[in-house]
Image (cartoon, rainbow, N blue to C red):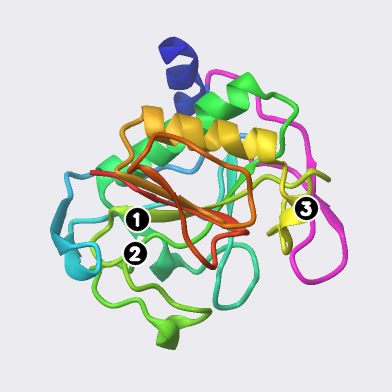
Amino acid sequence: MRRLVLALLIGLLPAPAAHAMQIDGPLVVVAAPAVDRPIAWRQSRALGKPFAGRLVDGVQLPAEGRDFWTFDWGTRLSPNRPWRRWGTDRLVRTVLAVIADYRAANPGAPRVGVADLSRPHGGPFGEEFGGLGHASHQNGRDVDVLYPRLDRLERRAGAPALVDQQLSQQLVDRFVAAGAVYVFTGPHLRLHGRSRVVAKLSHHDDHMHVRIP
């Protein structure tokens, strides 16, 4: 399994087929990129608390990859704007590895939607930055991951009935296994996990909030 994840990350395996994606407009068919975009890796520091901190030497998640696409809470469009996609090197590596492992186990599944991480230098990320805003997401350790949809569209699940809870549970389990400190899920979903790690939180019926150490 570890070799498979590594192969996916460095581009040894073929790209997945095209997928249907619909954000707020008409349905379009988009092809996942054949090669993942390069990432400027560097050792990062998360200072302070996730709800009162900042990010030093953050790493930017690309706008999309063979296994993921990004979503902007402020515009409700894809891709997410560049300044909303920064995290610690550990967070970005964890997200990529978990999603690659999940996609290898579910080759027919659509790419995973990734929404906000942190701002380039961390700091407040409230309503003034679009959407409902975030009380946390301040030091590069938090990421929002959209639930896979039953219809397999690469789009936010606007209602609990649209969520593929079996595939979503697999993502929850993989993030927990990867060492997540918290995974917050929606109160109207059946998702579960390790006590004191996986918990219900309002406004999370369309995405899970993952925090890594």
Question: Dot 3: what SS?
Answer: helix
Q: Where is residue 17 in the image (x, y as percent from the top left)?
A: 77, 32
Q: In this view, does 86 lie to the left or right of 150?
A: left
Q: Residue 142 carries which label?
A: 1
Q: Name the residue under label 2.
A: 118
Q: Tell me the CA gap for discs 3 and 1.
A: 24 Å
Cα gap from disc 2 to disc 1, whole angstroms:
7 Å
Range shown magenta: 12-33
- In what element is the residue under mark 1? strand
N-terminal-most mark, 3 or 1: 1
Amino acid under label 3?
A: Leu
Residue type, mark 2 in image: Ser
Q: Residue furthest front?
A: 195
Q: Quadrant of residue 160?
A: bottom right
Name the mark nearer the viewer: 3 or 1: 3
User: Which residue is tagged 3?
Assistant: 162
Q: Which residue is drawn at 50% across and 79% down?
A: 132
Question: Residue at coordinates 61% horizontally, 28% vertically from top-left?
Answer: 103
